[in-house]
């Protein structure tokens, strides 16, 4: 086997960073699911290092795609071929594995979304508006409050015999409702099941409002690991729910697939190579004093050299990863903070 | 005298009327600075907590004018059309500002109430004319010229221009080479035409290669006709304007996709946007999304939604656009209309 082409997909989310390595048939060779722990740069760097060790000999990275809320950050570090939003990435991945899927339920750390697929394309989507009730971080928090490890949370819900009703509209209301039910003497299992039902009800009423949920229904994102939520979805929709094998890294897989498509069009990858990732990465922000907007501008430096910069509303500071060296120098010549 | 006009709420619709009126009476007009982070912060700090974002921003603009203008002009728009009202927050605006903005700015308040007939609508102009020491005959002449200027402005809007181009000289035309399609951008004028609050949505969509069509481009008779299908009169002028212009875009196939910008907690939008969305879902099924705006200054969530929407439009377009409007959802709200 000489020169096997592999593709890297990176999903930098609020709670986890997922990295996958796929081949050109989109088979998954490696997957990493890492907690962000508030240090995305370090975790991403370590993850990529791990991947580079796992890389088969004679294989090369022929394309890189990034997605997730930190996709620009990841792009700044690796210089990606595609930088795509999560909706497109998730839709792409699901359509590859389950071509006749019509609905994707996705619940992540701070985002929840619904994506409708019809005839093999994304036809509609919605994301949560301004509230994080009904997302993974809310479950995390409640599990902690009940003293139940999040990994066992779902299994406990399945043991419930008489689920209690918990107010799901707002995380604060849900919490006070739960405390009240505990004080009434309801069992932990029943409260957890009630919480799963509440989260699903909230999701369907908010994110899923007015959306036509048709089978097959695919459920993914970190929360899909929770069998209690899966069961509650099945009960609410009266339909089987498919949780794909790699439900936790579907966004990253989608980014990898998109990278393959992009590089087949362009012919070459922009990926900087693993060697370029050895140095120290530093992110720093400064407040631009150019006008009354006082934008927070973010710079990514690698060994003291500017890699990328973004964040200003007017674009005067913008430097994209992989820009020509000359424009980088010009930008660096601009007054620095 | 130097009269300050806050660049907020309905300034982008009525500026020619107000400016011409004051100029004709021999006064200078000073606009507040464009919305910035400082103006937003000032407004949010001063204003009562439960007002909507645009009202908070209005407070910030008034504060921006303190010390620069002799008088600050605050229109109290009660009704702009017989038998209709506009949002109650506009009715209480002068009192809110007087009680919340520190430093007791000198206000010049125009009461505009056409509820009992258009004749009554002009009374307020004579009142502020007298406050400025002008004779009624002078007011009459100034008002006639102001209405004339306003008429010309409205004609330009109906001719396809938009306030950002006409008032701020912002070029908003997609390059001639791009034929990606047209997006109907729907929302209250104080969201759409404020580059800060709207996170520069107009420019971003144009840069992505789309032509834009706005509610202000749709003639009133079409709006009335589109809204006449509802069993009751829609007595909120601006709500009717949004719904009617959206329906006209749908029915007239004027847009390939609809993006609605709404500010968090807007009562009128909660009805009108829902009605528009249901109608689209039932009869047209073009790409449709709602983006809720509030005080966030981070662009990431906003850009993700915009990008995902445009991706979806292109993806659907490539697949030949056809989506069967039939098929029963498992979980869908039944609409009365």
Image (cartoon, rainbow, N blue to C red):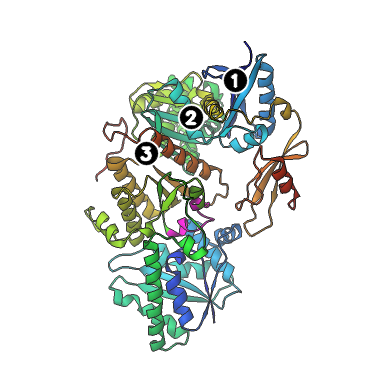
Residue B326 lies, in percent from the top left, at 26, 33
For label 3, the residue is A209
| CB atoms of marks 3 and 1 within 8 Å | no
Q: In which quarter of the image is residue A145?
A: top right
Region rendered in magenta: B189-202
Chain to which the residue tagged by mark 1 belongs? A
Q: Up-down: is A100 above or below B168?
A: above
Q: Estimate the spatial distance between the alpha carbons at disc 1 and disc 2, rounded to whole Å.
A: 20 Å
Q: In which quarter of the image is residue A97?
A: top left
Q: Indicate the secondary structure of the residue bearing disc 3.
A: loop
Q: Up-down: is A119 above or below A318?
A: above
The label number, if any, that marks residue A98 in the structure image: none
Q: Do labels 2 and 3 share a chain?
A: yes
For label 2, the residue is A90
For label 1, the residue is A6
Residue A334 lies, in percent from the top left, at 73, 51
Crowdedness near tag 2: few (<14), some (14–19) or many (≥20) residues, C-alpha within 10 Å? many
Q: Up-down: is A306 above or below A1?
A: below
Is A48 on the left-hand or right-hand side of B124?
right
Residue B302 lies, in percent from the top left, at 51, 45
């Amino acid at each position: 086997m000489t020169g096997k082409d592999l593709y890297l997909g990176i999903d930098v989310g609020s709670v986890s960073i997922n990295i996958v390595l796929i081949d050109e048939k989109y088979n998954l060779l490696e997957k990493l699911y890492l907690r962000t722990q508030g240090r995305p740069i370090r975790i991403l760097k370590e993850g990529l290092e791990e991947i580079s060790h796992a890389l088969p000999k004679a294989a090369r990275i022929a394309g890189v795609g990034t997605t997730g809320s930190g996709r620009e950050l990841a792009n700044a570090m690796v210089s990606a071929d595609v930088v795509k939003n999560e909706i497109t990435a998730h839709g792409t991945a699901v359509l590859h594995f389950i071509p006749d899927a019509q609905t994707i339920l996705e619940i992540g750390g701070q985002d929840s979304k619904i994506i409708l697929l019809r005839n093999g394309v994304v036809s509609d989507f919605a994301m949560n508006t301004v509230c994080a009730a009904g997302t993974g971080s809310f479950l995390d928090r409640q599990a902690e409050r009940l003293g139940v490890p999040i990994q066992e949370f779902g299994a406990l819900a399945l043991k419930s015999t008489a689920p209690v009703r918990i107010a799901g509209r707002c995380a604060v209301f849900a919490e006070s409702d739960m405390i009240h039910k505990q004080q009434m003497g309801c069992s932990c299992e029943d409260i957890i099941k009630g919480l799963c039902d509440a989260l699903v009800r909230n999701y369907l009423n908010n994110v899923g409002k007015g959306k036509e949920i048709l089978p097959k229904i695919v459920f993914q994102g970190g929360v899909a690991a929770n069998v209690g939520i899966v069961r509650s979805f099945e009960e609410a929709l009266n339909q089987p729910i498919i949780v794909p094998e790699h439900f936790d890294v579907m966004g990253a897989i989608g980014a990898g697939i998109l990278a393959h498509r992009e590089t087949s069009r362009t012919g070459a990858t922009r990926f900087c190579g693993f060697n370029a990732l050895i140095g120290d990465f530093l992110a720093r922000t400064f407040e631009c004093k150019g006008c009354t907007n006082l934008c927070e501008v973010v710079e990514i430096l690698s060994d003291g050299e500017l890699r990328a910069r973004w964040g200003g509303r007017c674009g005067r500071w913008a430097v994209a990863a992989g820009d020509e060296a000359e424009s980088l120098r010009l930008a660096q010549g601009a007054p620095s903070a | 005298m130097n009269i300050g006009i806050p660049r907020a709420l309905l300034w982008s619709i009525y500026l020619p009327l107000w400016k011409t009126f004051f100029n004709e009476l021999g006064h200078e007009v000073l606009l507040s600075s464009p919305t910035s982070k400082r103006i937003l912060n000032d407004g949010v700090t001063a204003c009562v907590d439960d007002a909507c974002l645009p009202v908070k921003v209005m407070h910030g603009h008034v504060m921006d004018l303190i010390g620069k203008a002799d008088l600050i002009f605050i229109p109290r728009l009660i009704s702009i059309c017989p038998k209709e009202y506009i949002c109650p927050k506009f009715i209480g605006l002068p009192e809110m500002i007087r009680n919340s903005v520190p430093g007791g700015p000198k206000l010049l308040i125009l009461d505009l109430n056409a509820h009992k007939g258009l004749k009554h609508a002009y009374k307020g102009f004579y009142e502020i004319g007298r406050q400025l020491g002008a004779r009624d005959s002078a007011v009459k002449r100034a008002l006639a010229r102001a209405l004339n200027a306003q008429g010309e402005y409205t004609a330009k809007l109906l001719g396809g221009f938009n306030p950002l181009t006409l008032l701020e000289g912002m070029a908003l035309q997609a390059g001639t080479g791009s034929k990606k399609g047209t997006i109907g951008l729907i929302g209250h004028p104080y969201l759409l035409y404020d580059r800060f609050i709207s996170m520069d949505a107009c420019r971003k969509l144009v840069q992505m290669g789309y032509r834009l069509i706005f509610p202000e481009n749709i003639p009133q008779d079409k709006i009335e006709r589109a809204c006449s299908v509802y069993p009751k009169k829609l007595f909120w002028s601006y709500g009717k304007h949004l719904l009617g212009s959206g329906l006209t875009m749908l029915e007239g196939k004027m847009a390939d996709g609809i993006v609605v910008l709404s500010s968090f907690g807007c009562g009128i939008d909660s009805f009108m946007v829902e009605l528009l969305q249901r109608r689209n879902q039932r009869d047209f099924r073009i790409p449709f999304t709602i983006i809720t705006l509030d005080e966030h200054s981070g662009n990431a969530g906003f850009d993700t939604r915009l990008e995902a929407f445009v991706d979806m439009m292109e993806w659907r377009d490539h697949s030949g656009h056809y989506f069967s409007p039939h098929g029963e959802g498992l979980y869908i709200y039944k609409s009365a209309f």
